[in-house]
């Protein structure tokens, strides 16, 4: 199966091709903004290096969020557009599940160990949180909670949390007399991890929709509203 995977959901931009023979070609770059301009050139590069045209793709995958309100939409829109013109099927999953897969693939979180958490700083004292088995299976989440609420939901066996919100969870755990190790604070969703998940999923989705757990920060100015007649 030839899979193109796209991620722009958080602080990185990436495109990866997983070929039918198991080869992986990827372009991934950390960036705070500019995902829209960077993504399609990355797609062109990985497709050219893989020697594939879009008609030979079996699946196009994208991360669905949570994450940046605009960023989440970029990969989804690109995946939809490319699938429409190539007739390729779609698949997607949430950003935290992709991060869990990336953490396991990196070897920083050991397979065969106890369940672990993924926590992402969502600002304003909140985190995006999910709980995963030692092989990346989802147990809970993603949810938008405080670090304290995340600790309260942790089973006793969970001792590791990864991601930019992990230290907040570890600090909240210490206040409750629990020991939780914070790891991989720079962890981001990975197009490579997404491609692996898409391959193993054995399913497709009829469409891709953004997963938002909080409203956008930008809101219309009340003073600029036009009065209705």
Image (cartoon, helix red, strand yellow):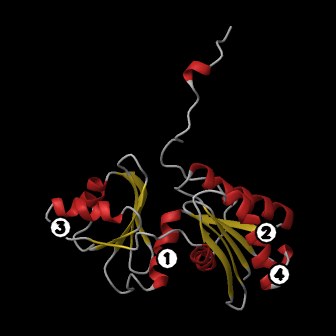
Residue at point 65% right, 53% down? 73
Residue matched to label 1: 101
Image quadrant where one finds the N terminus: bottom right
Give the label, 2 or 1, closer to the camera: 1
Q: CA distance from mark 2 to mark 1?
A: 24 Å
Give the mark, 1 or 4, whose residue is nearer the N terminus. Answer: 4
Q: Is residue 101 visible?
A: yes
Residue matched to label 4: 52
Q: Which residue occupies the foreground of this view, 199 or 226? A: 226
Give the mark, 4 or 3, whose residue is nearer the N terminus. Answer: 4
Residue matched to label 2: 88
User: In this image, 10 relative to 131: left or right?
Assistant: right
User: In this image, 133 relative to 22: left or right?
Assistant: left
Q: CA distance from mark 1 to mark 4?
A: 26 Å
The answer to which image quadrant residue 203 occupies is bottom right
Q: CA distance from mark 3 to mark 2?
A: 48 Å
> How far across and down, in percent of the image, does residue 171 sit?
24, 62
Q: CA distance from mark 4 to mark 3?
A: 51 Å
> How far across and down, in percent of the image, does residue 176 sit?
16, 60
Q: Secondary structure at mark 4?
A: loop
| Rendered view: 138 above or below 71 | below
User: In this image, 190 relative to 205: left or right?
Assistant: left
Q: Secondary structure at mark 2?
A: loop
The answer to which image quadrant residue 5 occupies is bottom right
Give the label, 2 or 4, closer to the camera: 4
Outermost residue on the left side: it is: 177
Which mark is drawn over residue 178? 3
């Amino acid at each position: 199966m030839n899979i193109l995977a796209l991620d722009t959901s958080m602080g990185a931009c990436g495109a990866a091709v997983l070929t039918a023979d198991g080869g992986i070609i990827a372009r991934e770059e950390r960036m705070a903004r500019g995902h829209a301009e960077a993504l399609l050139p990355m797609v062109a590069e990985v497709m050219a290096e893989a020697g594939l045209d879009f008609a030979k793709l079996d699946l196009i995958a994208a991360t669905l969020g949570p994450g940046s309100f605009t960023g989440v939409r970029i990969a989804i829109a690109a995946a939809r557009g490319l699938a429409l013109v190539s007739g390729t099927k779609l698949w997607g999953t949430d950003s935290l599940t992709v991060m869990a897969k990336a953490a396991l693939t990196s070897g920083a979180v050991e397979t065969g160990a106890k369940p672990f958490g993924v926590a992402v700083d969502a600002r304003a004292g909140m985190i995006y949180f999910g709980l995963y088995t030692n092989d990346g299976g989802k147990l809970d989440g993603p949810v938008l909670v405080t670090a304290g609420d995340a600790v309260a939901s942790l089973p006793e066996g969970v001792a590791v949390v990864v991601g930019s919100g992990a230290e907040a969870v570890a600090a909240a755990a210490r206040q409750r007399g629990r020991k939780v190790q914070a790891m991989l604070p720079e962890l981001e969703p990975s197009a490579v991890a997404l491609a692996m998940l898409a391959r193993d999923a054995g399913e497709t989705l009829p469409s891709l929709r953004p997963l938002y757990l909080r409203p956008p920060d930008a809101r219309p100015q009340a003073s600029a509203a036009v009065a209705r007649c």
